[in-house]
Amino acid sequence: MTEGKGSADTDRGGAEVFRGSFTQQEPIPEAGIEAALRVMRSGRLHRYNTVEGETAEAALLEQEFAAQTGAKYCLAVASGGYALACALRAVGVAPGDRVLTNAFTLAPVPGAIASLGAEPVFVGVTEGLVIDMDDLAERAAASGARVLMLSHMRGHVCDMEALMQLCADRGITVIEDCAHTMGAAWNGRPTGRWGAMGCFSTQTYKHANSGEGGLIISDDAQAMARAVMLSGSYMLYGRHLAAPPPEAFETIRYETPNISGRMDNLRAAILRPQLGDLSRQCARWNERYRVVEEGLRATPGLTLVKRPEAEGFVASSFQFLLLDWGAEAIRAVLARCAARGVELKWFGAPEPVAFTSRYDSWRYARSAPMPATDRILHAIIDMRLPLTFSLEDCAQIARIIRAEVSAVFQGDLAAPEALRMGD
Ligand SMILES: *Cc1c(COP(=O)(O)O)cnc(C)c1O
């Protein structure tokens, strides 16, 4: 199957049903397929397996992504989660350290922190679906944490000037999780370029697709030299095109363990044409987002997320809130939309389902209850917007959600007892 595009249809009652697949991405561009075939025919898939005069695809990918984001250095690695853990090690996080991170994020983020034997300290989320700065200040003071792993979760970018100031004032190093913000910016400066290191994922569901993969960018020569050694460069870092100069490795090369997690040339070959086309793809995602947003505007009971002027977002997914709805009513909306082909995810579900997760389901990282954050998480409904959906598909999806949210909100299920909070 190469096209997941939906087609309109109706159920027995005559209501329209969406037939597209929310998990179907576009095919790899032909240029990527051809480049991948060249790598496979050469047999030299390992990034350091080059012949005289040859430059590895992985090195070229790093050079191009550094140029694209304006970063001095870039390193390609095995996954987004590996990028996060590698960045934490590179800035010196040690076992037992506490690391601040978003309560609204996905499992690989606290998982990366835990993989170092460090302890996640969760920070609350606002109605705008970004990190709560007041809560951040409080938890930073209470925990004494010196590192923030900032997750631009679902592509929502906080006020980065305010965040960087808050962290600078407290001596907190920021690492950005840009798994959902490749191509996005705040006030024109790309995400990943604000903190000490920026980490990206090229896993299938993100903005570039190599199955698995990750990228780290930074302007910090010491931290990046450590990251390169950590990723498993042995003493071959001189073959990189976007790594710090040899001087930066002088002592680091002896002191840094090899925690193997390189990217290979096959994935790099697949990614290079995709990154070249990124801004066009981002514009296509946002066109789809705006159609859904327009279609849901002024739906009774439904709260849209306000996107600030300074936020140059890339909307590969869509979120809305059913604020202060009861669990039963939310489940009714999900079931009714699912029956019409619209696959919604609920971040508030008490048990983690599929990719959906919340801070209190990661029991290895205990957190005190966060009532203000619980109210938001309970309200978040999420869906993917793959580029295989047409604009008409998006309009149809919005019509279905609008109809079902309205029906539940205005119908029996919205009776006061059903709307009460809690399960
Ligand atoms: C996917 C994802 C990651 C990790 O990326 P992988 O490449 O799957 O390891 C990190 N953070 C967030 C928010 C993600 O969605």
Image (spheres, rainbow, N blue to C red):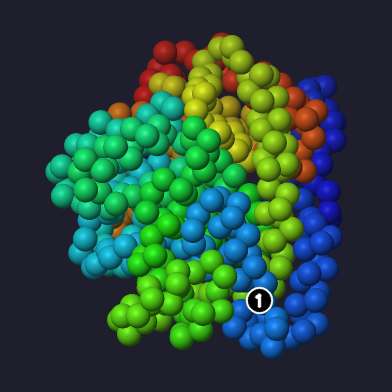
In this rendering, the answer to whether 157 lies above or below 400 is below
Return the x and y of residue 175 as percentages of the image width and height: 38, 52
User: In the rendered view, would you say 259 is above or below 20?
Assistant: below
Residue 65 appearing in the image: yes
| Residue drawn at point x = 60 percent, y = 63 percent | 63
Can you say which quadrant of the picture contains the N terminus?
Answer: bottom right
Identify the residue shown where x is 66% and y is 76%.
56
**Above-or-below relation of 310 to 47:** above
Foreground: 109 or 267?
A: 267
Q: Is residue 261 above or below residue 387?
A: below
Residue at which label 1 appears: 56
Q: Helix, strand or loop at disc 1?
A: loop
Q: Nearer the viewer, residue 101 or 186?
A: 186
Q: Residue at x 45, y 54 (%)?
A: 198
> Which residue shows up at 52% across the image and 23% down it?
309
Res 224 → quadrant: bottom left
Residue 69 in picture, x, y percent from top left: 55, 50
The x and y percentages for residue 20 are: 77, 40
- The image quarter containing residue 263 is bottom right
Q: Is residue 392 left or right of residue 232?
A: right
Task: Return the residue nearer the eye: 51 or 79.
Answer: 51
Along the line of sight, which residue is nearer the eye, 398 or 198? 198
Q: Quadrant of the C terminus?
A: top left
Side of 138 relative to 153 (left or right):
left
